[in-house]
Image (tube, coloured by chain):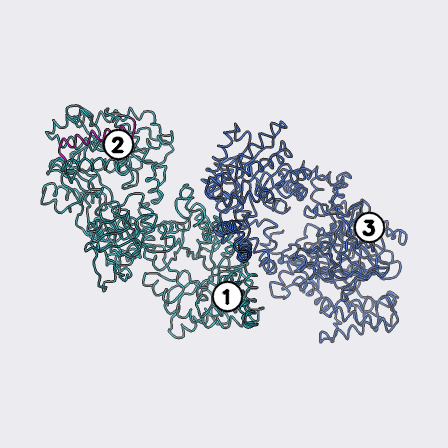
Chain colours: A blue, B cyan
């Protein structure tokens, strides 16, 4: 992010002036086009200029008024462009045509609006026809311009445009646009202009300067359009960035069979294999490729049709990849055999392609390991951990489409994003099925397990978005007729699948089925293993897992966890065989009875710990003593009341039977009422339980130590044991409970610092402020960032997420949930303060994070920079955490260079 | 508090070496005796030495082992004492006798144990008898020593001692102790020694060195005794301070009619009138006076009996008061006409006496106003605000006792502290009635409205403790027979009052009645008004009141509030005529219906505001927009369910009646369920409501502004309006809602900064960290320290206070409730951080406190030192806050000198 203190007062840059370093100012597209111009030469990139993001910001800040000087600068740049090209915009004889495209700092595919062929009007179209000797091309260009300008700049509805085309095609018996002849196109242009005038109340603007001015405004306005806002919310892009506008000389892929347009990736964008991939359409403009409306041809076929252009393209892709040090996603146009590069950017790609690229890039010498790691988006790796179809399952193929985003998914068919969102809210698994998708469907991608479309390819909206989100996606399954209105999919052979019926897709193969295929865990590629090994060497932040059972513990180690950062002992009490004993303990009258009940639980706890310790020999295991309020182990009040009422009326009918059960329930009810809390989150839990009922913690500590001794005796090994006291506010709480732990240890010949450590969770704001004092009694801190977020923000997770988080995201109060990514300005500062204060007291204090943020890449980056020793997350997130930790270290090294 | 880094290695100081500055080391009594020795001369104060608090700390830290060197130092000091006095401890012919008394840093009356006449044994008692020519005195002294040593040092039960005395008196036909002759006392001594041996298994120690060693240990041990611990908890004295031990030459008030002992105050300790007061007993030792067992004589009578000693005493009291600059509470003994001062300390006194003294001290030139203020304990002023009997009521006197602590109280009679505590927990008003009170009754003082005893005077335990706590108390109502066992009070004329029946006392007059006397508000003395006026001049911290109604507002102004710091608008919605409208608003379907319901509420809100604004013309009124979660305005779920069940069964019986009501209840139930929250404290409340339902805040803001305009129109005046947005976490929340407020203002021609301010409550930890950003959108901050305490500590007030606060106080984790006095290390630091960050952004940002801590003197002191501009508290606490704020400023000035 550039410093904004001194705003740039130059609003327009020629492509030849820019470079990729000026991305913040020129936008991603502008910077890259400039960069391409620099490295590929002016011959390969149509000339043009970029109106800066600063201009957009100034426009928005002035309530949609162009800033002073902008018009003059645009006029100057246009004049330079006209000189460079040797044509004049709107020239009656040989007009310069330009495209106007948005280009934000971060690529926002499909979000921003584009106008092509600007500069045509009723006179220049004739000039173009004459000059090119191709009247059809000229009129096709003009009608496209009127259509796009009307739609994009002035809001003429797509449906009316489509209806106009449909009607005309019908009149002319045409199926494809290309079936329309010059007269038909001339007629279509006329009808579009009429439509324009009907819709806007103004004639279609003939003056090219006015066309340009309105188009630039439209790009600016589209930045604040609903779709763009939604995309930014999902992709966490600040509204204040603004977009740049690129005005570029038009080149034409629709000038006949020696022309064409396409997208090309420097490597396979799905698998990452080191072969360029892509799609193209002959005799078409670029928008036709990206829109997914016409089915594209594979880039490899270009070698046959236009071998020279293909060879040039291949060479250029290699050059760009080397230059950018990353896989490239390009757009190109071939105009009568001449290859033009319109755009390049780092390719969005699914996790497996990212991993494959990273490994190959290192082996090819393209990047070093740090550099390679920085090309991987750790969050996206989730996709590698997605289930796939069970390979042994016999699957009946319903249809096949383009494997657009890897991973398998199954669920009930829904046809709209709204339905997907509603279903997800109810916890139902659904697959979103659409002919094609658009920006307004994005919310449905989040909610659905997978996405299926009948149109578009790997570069379609659906494919791009699904890959970005790590959602399995199959695109372009053209044998399926997806009838959204009718609420059904019509498949070959008369098969009909209705909304709500099950479907399954494999985004890695393109297979679609209605079978109830078993899904199996992701199997990691060799490359992923390689990357993870590098990560373990490159990172400095430790990665542990949260695991409560021996099975979890083993899985955690398989995923590469270096220990257990949080074992929640309460989960052990929730098991069916434990719960009655736990309840007996809670219902006990007085300490003696409670101790007796605890004695029933102790051997079970010890058994659990032994299993855990055997699975974690030689690595740290951090065990948290009982944390939740006791009422969580009891039935709900209304359950007990209902059962009592039933028993009483039954008893009354039977003349007094069931008295024993009634008495028991009455006793339970009394205790349930006593333990009820208005705000359980802020109630009698954590170490408060240990202070009130030391016998509970004593039992747990004895079970832990006896388990260590038993495992050591049996196997000769033991974990590096850490006993953790939760929810500490006051140093005295920890002092008292540490004493309790040490007493039990001493009685068993165990020594703190050698055989085990005693530490605390830091999960209350007060504890952060008192961390220096608390550290006197702690060998380690583990930040419980979930609860710290709840208390620091006053957000009850149970209530907030369902009740107002959505509105808060809409209103831009939050850019993401603070339960997903650490709220660094608040909670993060508390973590840093506590880390600093704790280490002030004890230089070597071990610091960990055991909240869910420990598995979130952005949060991990923050923790890396906050002096945290390790994060701990769910076993499935461990690989992501390993990569995120390594990336954080790599970023730090890169910044230090 | 002295620095403890380098411990003092001298454990014993002679009185002649000490001074009052060394209070931390020598304890209050030791320091004062040393000081008295210095200013009154060695002739007036019996010689002795003090064993330091450091020695006690070392003893406790070494698990009750005397530190090295202590024994040798004691021996040395004793030798110097013997040389000074010219007698030897335990000498057979002319023994030196000493007292051993505890003396902590803060006076702990009745808590610590005392041994008198140490040095007597079977031989030296004969020497004393021969030397004094008073065998009765010698044996009375010896039997007292054996009795006290046995009881205090070795734990011989009081009951057995009392029984022994009673039996012997019976055998000798004696009523009073003084009726016993030498032989009887000799016999009594023998019986006490036998009792000692029975109880301890050892003979009574004859060796004076051993007597002394055991006594010193006993004082040390008593520091950790239950009673002392309880007192410290109540009085917030750290355990780690330890107590000093004072060993002092005995002087004897029981050497006949020219001897006596007493307590004397330099002014009247109840009213503060500038006349010395006190009690004495002729021919008695000091313990007899303080114990309250014998009814004492007024100090004025001493002038008749021993005029010289009386004159000397009066002169000494003046000297001491001048020297200490405070009212003195002394103990003296007259031995055969010679006046000895045994102790002096600043007198504990009820609020009215404190106020009276402060005013007189300034008028007399004894103190300046700052100094006078510092003699007033602001917390104790509460007593001035206690109710009194309605002066117009005709009251039938049941009995009369000593007016021991001012204020009137009435309630049901209880006879034990436990009953008082139980009653208070149920919200019942009770009066604790005891023959006399002891340390174990202290919990009952907290719980009872008032205390009544039949024994003891103004210096009795009951009187001291009640005054300390500001509880009305009548002592020594000797015409009442208080039969704790029998559960009744027998009054003159055969009146019997049983447990649970009503009694009323007037602690300012000593009157006791069973009438249901109306109680009236406290009327302030002229002196109190004077003090409050001074306070307003001396303080720099503003004092406002929390008030929601015009009545409250008017009362607040009467109490001296300078404005309203918190007007909770939700209280307006709770009123009976508002609640249905509020419910309609909450039950509304969609914004339109909600707006319609709000329109019903708006005129009512406006009316409330108009009343408030008229009462507060020209002063600030801070109005908080709606804060509590909406479900607080709806009935409880189980209530609705129960009503529904009733209606349905009734409906079934009647064949379908009540369907409309059922539908309404069903609708309510749905909304109640939707709005239910797991942790309402952390849920959808505060500004979150304003974000979710802007129409609610809009309605409130419109009502506020229209009210201001209406009042301005009608009266030409308006308050200094402040609109406050609660529960802000994110600056964007405040930004959005400030905009909403400003829009409504602009529409009415009102200007922020001129006609009103917009600010926020700082009550979440995150907000403290983001205060610099939040301040961009705030004209003021008001710290909501109640909620900040809840979130910072993770303490739900509703749950914590009842469920574990008691245990936390017992375990010394807390020294007081963080809801009563601000938790400065945690919450206090957050307040300071937010104040600093907020002022970093806006130098002139107005800072207030509107939590209950705003009425707590210790918290006020903290706020004064934290740059806060004003505190706001309940109207009744306003005078206390004014004094506390002035004291904080006075302390600061004193420290700066």
| Residue A719, image x, y percentages | 60, 32
| Residue A589 seen in this snapshot | yes
Mark 3 or 2, which is nearer the eye? 2
Chain letter of disc 2 in the image = B
Q: Residue furthest front?
A: A655
Give how far apart the Cα atoms at labels 2 and 1 are. 75 Å
How many tags in the picture? 3
Q: For mark 1, what is the residue?
A: B741
Classify the position of the C terminus of chain B by image quarter: top left
Dominant secondary structure of the magenta stretch?
Answer: helix
Q: Name the residue under label 2.
A: B150
**Placement of B406 over or under A596, stated as above or below:** below
Q: Is residue B587 left or right of residue A255?
A: left
For this view, does B243 lie left or right of residue A130?
left
Mark 1: secondary structure? helix
Is B753 on the left or on the right of A489, as rendered?
left
**Chain ID for label 3?**
A
Whole-angstrom CA distance, mark 3 to mark 2, is 95 Å
Q: Where is residue B77 in the image (x, y as percent from the top left)?
A: 24, 27
Residue B791 at x, y = what percent? 49, 51
Where A196 falls versus A431 (above or below)? below
Name the N-terminal-most of marks 2 and 1.
2
Q: Answer few, some or many: residues within 10 Å of disc 3's Cα (few below 14, many 20 plus, some between 14 and 19).
A: some
Q: Which residue is rendered at x = 90% and y = 52% of the image?
A: A304
Query: What is the secondary structure assignment of the residue under circle 2?
Result: helix
Between label 2 and label 1, give the one nearer the viewer: 2
Report which residue position mark 3 lands on: A395
Where is residue A704? Give x, y as percent.
56, 35
Classify mark 1: residues with Cα within 10 Å, few (<14), some (14-19) or many (20+): many
The quarter in which the N terminus of chain B is drawn is: top left
């Amino acid at each position: 992010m550039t410093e904004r203190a001194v705003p740039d007062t130059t609003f327009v840059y020629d492509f030849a002036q820019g470079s990729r370093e000026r991305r913040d100012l020129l936008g991603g597209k502008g910077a890259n086009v400039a960069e391409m111009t620099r490295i590929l030469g002016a011959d390969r990139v149509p000339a043009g200029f970029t109106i800066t993001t600063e201009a957009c910001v100034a426009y928005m800040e002035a309530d949609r008024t162009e800033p002073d000087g902008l018009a003059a600068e645009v006029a100057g740049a246009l004049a330079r462009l006209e000189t460079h090209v040797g044509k004049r915009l709107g020239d009656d004889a040989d007009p310069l045509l330009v495209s106007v495209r948005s280009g934000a700092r971060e690529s926002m595919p499909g979000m921003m609006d584009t106008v092509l062929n600007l500069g045509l009007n009723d006179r220049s179209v004739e000039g173009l026809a004459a000059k090119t000797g191709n009247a059809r091309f000229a009129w096709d260009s003009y009608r496209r311009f009127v259509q796009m300008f009307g739609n994009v700049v002035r809001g003429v509805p797509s449906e009316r445009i489509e209806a106009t085309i449909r009607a005309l095609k019908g009149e002319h018996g045409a199926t494809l646009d290309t079936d329309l002849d010059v007269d038909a196109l001339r007629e279509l242009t006329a009808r579009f202009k009429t439509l324009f005038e009907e819709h806007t109340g103004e004639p279609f603007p003939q003056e090219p300067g006015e066309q340009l001015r309105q188009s630039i405004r439209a790009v600016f306005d589209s930045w604040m359009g609903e779709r763009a806002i939604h995309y930014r919310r999902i992709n966490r892009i600040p509204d204040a960035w603004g977009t740049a506008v690129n005005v570029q000389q038009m080149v034409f892929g629709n000038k006949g069979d020696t022309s064409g347009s396409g997208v090309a990736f420097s490597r396979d964008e799905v698998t990452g294999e080191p072969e360029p991939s892509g799609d193209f359409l002959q005799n078409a403009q670029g928008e036709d490729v990206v829109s997914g409306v016409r089915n594209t041809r594979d880039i490899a076929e270009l070698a046959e049709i236009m071998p020279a252009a293909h060879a040039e393209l291949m060479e250029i892709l290699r050059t760009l990849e080397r230059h950018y040090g990353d896989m490239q996603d390009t757009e190109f146009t071939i105009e009568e055999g001449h290859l033009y590069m319109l755009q390049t950017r780092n390719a969005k790609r699914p996790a497996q392609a990212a991993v494959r690229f990273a490994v190959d890039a290192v082996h090819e010498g393209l990047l070093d390991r740090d550099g390679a790691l920085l090309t991987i988006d750790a969050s996206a790796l989730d996709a590698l951990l997605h289930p796939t179809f069970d390979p042994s399952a016999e699957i009946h193929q319903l249809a096949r489409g383009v494997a657009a985003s890897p991973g398998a998914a199954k669920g009930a068919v829904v046809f709209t994003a709204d339905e997907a969102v509603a279903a997800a809210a109810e916890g139902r698994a659904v697959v979103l099925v659409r002919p094609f998708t658009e920006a307004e469907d994005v919310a449905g991608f989040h909610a659905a397990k997978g996405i299926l479309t009948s149109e578009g390819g790997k570069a379609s909206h659906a494919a791009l978005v699904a890959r970005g989100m790590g959602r399995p996606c199959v695109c372009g399954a053209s044998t399926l007729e997806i009838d959204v209105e009718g609420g059904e999919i019509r498949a070959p052979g008369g098969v009909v699948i209705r909304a709500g019926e099950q479907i399954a897709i494999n985004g890695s193969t393109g297979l679609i089925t209605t079978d109830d295929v078993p899904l199996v865990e992701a199997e990691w590629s060799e490359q992923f293993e390689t990357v993870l090994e590098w990560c373990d060497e490159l990172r400095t932040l430790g990665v542990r897992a949260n695991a409560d059972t021996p099975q979890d513990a083993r899985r955690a180690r398989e995923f590469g966890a270096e220990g257990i950062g949080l074992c929640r002992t309460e989960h052990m009490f929730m098991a069916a065989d434990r719960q009655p004993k736990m309840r007996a303990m809670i219902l006990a009258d007085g300490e003696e009875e409670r101790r007796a009940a605890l004695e029933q639980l102790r051997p079970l706890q010890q058994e659990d710990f032994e299993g855990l310790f055997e699975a974690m020999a030689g690595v740290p295991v951090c065990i948290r003593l009982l944390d939740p309020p006791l009422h969580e182990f009891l039935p709900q009040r209304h359950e007990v009341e209902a059962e009592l009422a039933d028993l009483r009326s039954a008893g009354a009918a039977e003349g007094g039977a069931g008295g024993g059960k009634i008495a028991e329930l009455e006793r339970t009810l009394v205790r349930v009422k006593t333990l009820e809390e208005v705000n359980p989150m802020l109630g009698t839990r954590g170490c408060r339980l240990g202070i009130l009922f030391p016998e509970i913690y004593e039992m747990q500590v004895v079970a832990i130590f006896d388990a260590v001794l038993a495992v050591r005796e049996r196997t000769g090994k033991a974990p590096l044991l850490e006993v953790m006291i939760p929810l500490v506010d006051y140093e005295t709480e920890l002092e008292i409970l540490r004493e309790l732990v040490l007493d039990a240890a001493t009685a068993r010949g165990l020594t703190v610092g050698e055989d085990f450590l005693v530490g605390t969770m830091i999960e209350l704001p007060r504890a952060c402020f008192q961390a220096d004092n608390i550290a006197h009694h702690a060998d380690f801190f583990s930040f419980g960032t979930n609860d710290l977020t709840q208390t620091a923000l006053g957000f009850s997770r149970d209530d907030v997420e369902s009740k107002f988080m959505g509105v808060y995201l809409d209103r831009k109060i939050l850019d993401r949930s603070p339960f997903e990514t650490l709220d660094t300005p608040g909670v993060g500062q508390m973590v840093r303060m506590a880390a600093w204060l704790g280490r002030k007291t004890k230089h070597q204090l071990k610091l960990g994070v055991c909240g869910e943020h420990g598995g979130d890449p952005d949060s991990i980056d923050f923790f890396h920079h906050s002096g945290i020793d390790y994060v701990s997350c769910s076993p499935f997130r461990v690989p992501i955490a390993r990569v995120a930790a390594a990336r954080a270290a790599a970023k730090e090294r890169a910044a230090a260079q």
